[in-house]
């Protein structure tokens, strides 16, 4: 059984990524959505892939699971480093996070 991917207001798939250059290592994101975010040994937060592996490549993104959409959005809103970006998969437009319009 697959987990349904979250969609934005226009019904498009969403993904999330973290800018580690701005990450403060507070871990708020991992508290809100530990299924999506995790702190690594370097003290910075990363998103997790489908296999629970940390995606450590710069700009690496992971799909936002529908049941966790609110938690991921709250993480982006509460992040003191303003480093969590939620964007549409189709055109990479940020819908939540510091660069959202």
Image (cartoon, grey):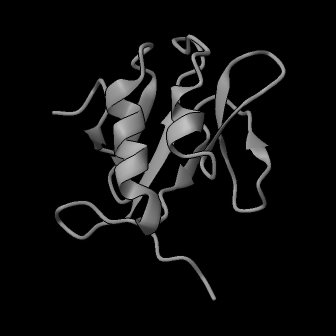
Nearer to us in this view, 67 or 89: 67
Q: Is residue 42 left or right of residue 30?
A: right
Q: Is residue 4 left or right of residue 100?
A: right
Q: Is residue 83 left or right of residue 11?
A: right
Residue 41, x across and y down, in percent: 84, 21
Residue 74, x across and y down, in percent: 35, 39
Which quarter shows the N terminus?
A: bottom right
Q: Is residue 72 visible?
A: yes
Which residue corresponds to the image point at 78% horizontal and 61% vertical from the top-left?
Answer: 51
Which residue corresponds to the image point at 34% horizontal and 52% vertical from the top-left?
Answer: 70
As drawn, 90 above or below 20: below
Residue 81, x across and y down, in percent: 45, 13
Q: Is residue 88 visible?
A: no
- The image quadrant that residue 50 belongs to is bottom right
Which residue corresponds to the image point at 59% horizontal and 24% vertical from the top-left?
Answer: 27
- The image quadrant that residue 58 belongs to is top right
Q: Is residue 19 left or right of residue 6?
A: right
As drawn, 42 above or below 63: above
């Amino acid at each position: 059984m697959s987990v349904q991917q979250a969609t934005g207001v226009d019904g498009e798939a969403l993904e999330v990524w973290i800018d580690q250059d701005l990450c403060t290592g507070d871990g708020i994101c991992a508290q809100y959505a530990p299924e999506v975010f995790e702190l690594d040994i370097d003290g910075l937060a990363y998103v997790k892939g489908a296999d629970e592996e940390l995606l450590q490549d710069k700009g690496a993104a992971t799909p936002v699971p529908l049941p966790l959409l609110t938690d991921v959005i709250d993480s982006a809103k509460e992040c003191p480093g303003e480093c969590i970006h939620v964007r549409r998969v189709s055109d990479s437009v940020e819908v939540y996070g510091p660069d959202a319009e």
